[in-house]
Amino acid sequence: MKNKNSPNSPKDISSISMATNNGANTHADFWNPNQYEKFKKERAQPFWDLAALVDWTGVHSFADLGCGTGELTTELAIEKKITIAYGIDNSPSMLKKTESVISPVQFKNCDIEKFSLEGKFATDEQKLDLIFSNAALQWVPEHVTLLSNLHHWLRPDGQIAIQMPANFNQPSHSLAELIARDLFPDRGENFIRKIPVLQPEDYSRLLFELGFHNQIVRQQIYPHLLEKSSDVIEWVRGTLLTHYEKVLSPADFQSFLTRYSERLLQELGDETPYLYTFRRTFIWGQK
């Protein structure tokens, strides 16, 4: 890894047009912080494992894309003594929790796609040392375009660090699509949750093409020991199933959730405790 000089901290990016939507929420927000944090400890470990990939020497500024409740972003910014830190998330309910804490992070309600596009218009003084994203980019389409846009935000020796789930072929995830197609065959393809995550070798090549010649791309299995197999339903209710809660009426979502729960428990069995193995992809690169 390259040691970075100590550049002056970049100017505030609040002048960038994407920085805030002035509180407007153009889509229903079905993210539930309390549901998401039922497995707070398990979800936190990959965040810190991702942070461990970063060369923090000379990192004075970063943006955390998909910061959620902002708690981990705040802890990271304080621990690493970051001068300028941004937390970007499009869920007002998740960001609401940031209002109750004292944080050096500037939290902004914004879509990640809009943030990435605005990197093309950032001045040299607004560019960042690090783009960081833990368990969020799996919700954003077109990853080739997305990463190409995000690299515009980075200073000449900047870094990018990304972690995403990679267990979409497991019953907890694959059954959701099967049940949705079975129950609502006339809804069309746009109704189905699309998975934009690429293969690890695709990200390695993409990083190289974007000029990230120092890189790490790996997958890791996290063995989560849950109290019982039905806890997997509670896990995905905080993440994947929010998509179907958003696109279905309350009655239809309840029908979907009932069928999904029945089928998933048939697949997993009634086990106490239950080992939920969760594969994740880690991506790190430095220009």
Image (cartoon, helix red, strand yellow):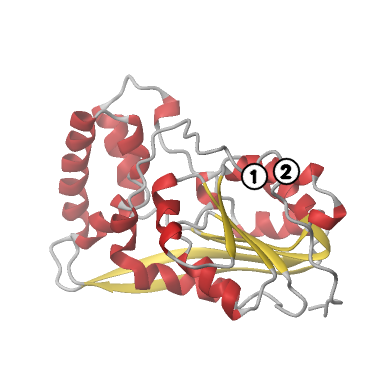
At x 79% / y 50%, what residue is drawn? Answer: 152
Q: Nearer the viewer, residue 285 or 76?
A: 76
Q: Nearer the viewer, residue 184 or 160?
A: 160
- Is 25 left, or right, of 216 in this rendering? left
Residue 235, quarter of the rendered image: bottom left
**Percent position of residue 147, x then y:** 69, 50
Q: Secondary structure at mark 2?
A: loop
Q: Residues within 10 Å of mark 1 (few under 14, many from 20)?
A: some
At x 35% / y 31%, what residue is drawn? Answer: 247
Q: Is residue 287 visible?
A: no
Residue 55, quarter of the rendered image: bottom right
At x 35% / y 42%, what residue is drawn? Answer: 30
Q: How many marks?
A: 2
Q: Are marks 2 and 1 in contact (CB under 8 Å)?
A: yes
**Which labelled disc corresponds to residue 19?**
1
Q: Nearer the viewer, residue 235 or 59?
A: 59
Q: Nearer the viewer, residue 243 or 196?
A: 243
Identify the residue under disc 2.
16
**Percent position of residue 277, x then y:** 35, 68
- Is 55 left, or right, of 232 in this rendering? right
